[in-house]
Amino acid sequence: MFKRIVDIGVSLIVILTIFPWLMPILMLIIRLDSKGPIFFKQKRVGFLGKTFWCYKFRTMYVNDCADTKRASSGDPRVTRSGWFLRNTCLDEVPQFFNVLLGHMSIVGPRPHMIKDTKEFSNLIDNYSYRHLVRPGITGLSQVRGYRGPATTFESILRRYQWDTYYVRNQSTLLDLRIMAGTAYLIVNSLLNRNNPVPVDTPAQAHLDSRPLARAANKKIA
């Protein structure tokens, strides 16, 4: 209950104090950069496996593969402003409305689109364990270095391990540490002139980088 109260309080603060002046700026940037809607919505898998509409600022040119194909490094579908929004996490700001509606929490495992959830569940048994809490705008795997597209078996596995660690050990202190870590990543990205935060940290450089397709026959229990 305390976590939900914090979610509602912080969401209202962001929506009432930040969103009113940030939205017109980003709306102008997105409009000038490419044609299409300001917002992008996509079906994501959330708490207890229920689907919901997840909202973001649009970061891609309008295309037919948005709901089936993950963004990749150097993806030509991503606009110039889209790279900035993605690298600074500003594209996620509309998800505070999802938090207010109860679809998401500020901190929790990131929600995946339906296609990815099915694909990852075929690789890892009990993948739905991460759905025992509300998905978050940010999460433990993100601050541990796993942001961006999950293109290898090991990156999917490591994200799952961090997500399940969060489910087992969630607390107010852990949430505060994750939010502080997320703020650091955003500031670091801005100070480094929009250079993206690396998906895999140097400490994880030794991990197997086999493509996901080649690891499809290796299911982890």
Image (tube, grey):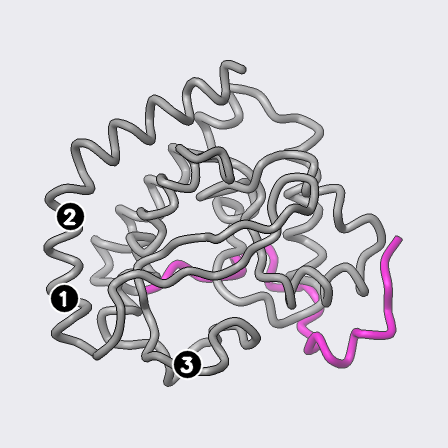
Tell me the magenta residue range. 196-221
Report how many numbered discs are placed on residues in the image.
3
Of the 4 image quadrants, the one containing the N terminus is top right
Q: Nearer the viewer, residue 98 or 203?
A: 98
Percent across and percent down for residue 53 are 48, 53
Mark earlier in primary sequence (2, 1): 2
Disc 3 marks which residue? 75
Between 186 and 53, the one nearer to me in the picture: 53
Front residue of 134/210: it is 134
- Callout 2 secondary element: helix
| Nearer mark to the viewer, of 3 and 1 | 1
Image x and y of residue 80, in percent? 24, 75
Q: Farthest top residue?
A: 2
Q: Earlier in the sequence, mark 3 or mark 1?
A: 1
Q: Amino acid at mark 1?
A: Ile
Q: Which mark is residue 29?
A: 1
What is the distance, in whole Å, between disc 2 and disc 1 at their CAs?
11 Å
Going 46% across and 29% down the picture, which residue do you hit?
A: 177
- State which quadrant residue 129 falls in: top right
Query: Magenta: predominant secondary structure element?
Result: loop
Q: Amino acid at mark 2?
A: Leu
Residue picked out by circle 2: 22
Mark 3 surroundings within 10 Å by alpha-carbon count, few (fewer than 14), some (14 through 19), many (20 or more): few
Determine the CA span between mark 3 and mark 2.
26 Å
